Amino acid sequence: MKNLKFKISAMTCVSCAWWVEATLKSTNWIEKAWVVFATETAIVDYDENIISKDEILKIVKNMGYVPIDSSLKNSENLEEEQKKKS
């Protein structure tokens, strides 16, 4: 089991965080998920042999939010966030 922590931009309310958390929890191979609106943070426990970090981030992105992968350069994250605002 692997742990992933990342920021999520573009959430506007607690319901957004709840929806992201519920969606992640309902995804196969994700053991646990917590999303905190106040800190715009998600923590996910998942089976890295079956689902990748990129696939998890893509789930959040496909929901209309901006997952911010701390392993990317800041400029790449800013570019992604700018695209979301356009």
Image (spheres, rainbow, N blue to C red):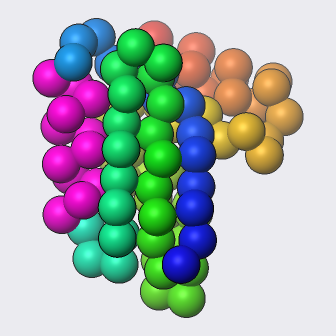
Q: Please count the marks in the image.
A: 0
Q: Is residue 80 above or below residue 70?
A: above
- The magenta span reads 15-26
Task: Determine the residue located farthest toward the bottom in the rendered image.
Answer: 49
Whole-percent x and y of residue 80?
Answer: 60, 28
Task: Give percent across and percent down for residue 59.
Answer: 36, 53
Give the residue displayed 37% in from the left and 28% down from the top. Answer: 36
User: Which quadrant of the structure image shows residue 20?
Assistant: top left
Magenta highlight: main SS? helix
Q: Nearer the viewer, residue 67 or 44?
A: 44
x and y, in percent, of residue 77 in the image:
69, 28
- Residue 39 visible (yes or no): yes
- Which residue is pictured at 22% across the width and 25% down the height? 16
Could you tell me residue 11's position as x and y percent?
A: 33, 19
Task: Confirm whether residue 84 shows in the render.
Answer: no
Q: What is the quadrant of residue 81 in the picture?
A: top right
